[in-house]
Structure formats: structure tokens, C-alpha cells
Amino acid sequence: MSVRPGIFISFEGIDGAGKSSHIEALAQRFKQQGREVTVSREPGGTPLAEKLRAIVLNDDMDPLTEALLVFAARRDHLRQAIEPALAKGQVLLCDRFTDSSFAYQGGGQGLEPELLGQLEQWVQARPHGASLRQPDLTIWFDLPPAQAAARLSQARAPDRFEAKDLAFFERVAHAYGVRAKAAGARFCRVDASAPREAVGREVMEAVRARGWLA
Ligand code: TYD
């Protein structure tokens, strides 16, 4: 019997946009409909990438070093986890992927999109002339940075990114908008300022609209 195609969905947004609970709910829904699901995150998702995550989130470094480390983590994650899961026909739900690099290292830290585009080409290349590996769908939780900051102030101790000022998150949010425009077909924008139930419904609807859920 042939394996049905895997589905790769990424979840994006500034810190505090509230992705996590929706990722979990979507994983449950896919499982109820008989799909095998892997939930992962970036940076991270493999033992090596999780070590890199700890470094990126805690140690001071320049923006290019940061970009190289998140893409190194991504390379390992793709080879060890994402590609094998998709080859088995699984649903792969990933909390952040390359759009985060364009938003944070690009918009936030000021690296040129062209440079990040080169790293993307290297890291997401596939054999035999296949197109770059990209998510089949990216759900973007769009939230005004001031609202995100208010949510985060009630949360745990911030990591290096969560501790950045509002201007940083304004730039990150803007970069998400630019990226969403450039890759329109892959992106689904969700209004993350809406009540949680409404956001959850939008997420399910985006996936149903692709024919992936009944
Ligand atoms: P996040 O996904 O928000 O996890 P948690 O909810 O556990 O804090 O944290 C990851 C952080 O890493 C987030 O602030 C964004 C940042 N990041 C980058 O700067 N570049 C990247 O390419 C990725 C994937 C994440």
C-alpha cells in the first residue's frame, strides 16, 4: 500500500501570540481522524538542535552567529525528524520554522533577507532538483506587539528574545507581514487578538479548507 503524503504545518507569530494550545488541539483533531502526528518546535526538535536552542536563547552573540545557529539546528531537525516523519506520511506540526528567522534575525536583528534567503536555500534544499522544503501551510498568529507584551509580562522569566523591547517586536511583526505577502499561498493569517475559541475555530478552518480534516 502506498504511503499517503505527509503534511507539514508551521505556526508563527511574535512571542505571546498564543500558539501552543492551538497546536495541541490541532494535533488531537488529526489523531482523532486517524493520522499519526508529530509535534515539534524550532529551534529544537532533535537532541542536537535542542542543545543549540539552549545556546541561542541564553547566550549573547551577534545576529549572524544567531542566524547560523538557528539554521544549523534546522538542518539537523529536517534530516533527523521532519523528513523522516513526512516520508512516513505523518502530520508534522512545528512550532516555528524559517519564517521566524526572517522575522527575528531579519526584522528584529536587522540581517538582510537576501542573506537569510541563502541560508534557506542551503538548508532546505532537497535532492534530485526537488523544490526547497517548505511547510505546506503556515498559520500566522498575528497580534499587535503591545498586546503580546502585556500577555508576556504575566508569564515566566523571559528568554533573550522575550526580553527585547517593543520596537524589536514591532520590527518582527512587520517582517512577518512582508514574508506573508511574499509567500501568500502558504500563509494563513489568524487574528490572534480574538478570543481563544474564535482563534481555535480559524485554525481548524484553515486546515479543513485544505482538505486535510473532515
Ligand atoms: P518560542 O517558540 O516562543 O518558545 P517558548 O514559548 O518556549 O519561549 O521561543 C523560541 C524563540 O526563538 C522565540 O523568541 C523566537 C526565537 N527564534 C528565532 O529568533 N529564530 C528562529 O529561527 C526561530 C525558529 C526562533
Image (spheres, rainbow, N blue to C red):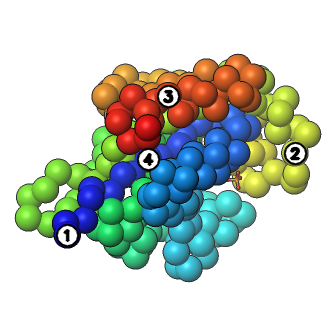
Marks 1/3 in contact by CB < 8 Å: the verdict is no
Q: Secondary structure at mark 3?
A: helix
Which numbered disc flags the more N-terminal residue, 1 or 3?
A: 1
Is disc 1 surrounded by few (<14), some (14 to 19) or many (20+) residues within 10 Å?
few
- State the count of labels: 4
The label nearer to you, 4 versus 2, is 4
Disc 1 C-beta below 8 A from ligand 1:
no
* Residue type, mark 3 in image: Glu
The structure residue drawn at horizontal position 29% and vertical position 67%, both measured from the top left corner, is 87
Residue that badge 4 annotates: 9
How far apart are the two marked residues, 2 and 1, measured between alpha carbons? 48 Å
Horizontal relation, residue 199 to residue 137: left or right: right
- Image position of 76 with respect to 196: above or below: below
* Residue type, mark 4 in image: Ile
- Image position of 7 with respect to 126: above or below: above
Where residue 84 sits: x, y (%)? 34, 72
Q: Secondary structure at mark 4?
A: strand
How far apart are the two marked residues, 4 and 1, measured between alpha carbons? 25 Å
Task: Give the number of the disc on residue 13.
Answer: none
* Residue type, mark 2 in image: Ala
Which numbered disc flags the more N-terminal residue, 4 or 1?
A: 1
Task: Give the number of the disc on residue 205.
Answer: 3
Which numbered disc flags the more N-terminal residue, 3 or 2?
A: 2
Query: Does any portion of residue 193 appear in the rendered image?
Result: no
Rendered-image quadrant of the C terminus: top left
Residue that badge 2 annotates: 155
Which numbered disc flags the more N-terminal residue, 2 or 1?
A: 1
The label nearer to you, 4 versus 3, is 3
Residue that badge 1 annotates: 1
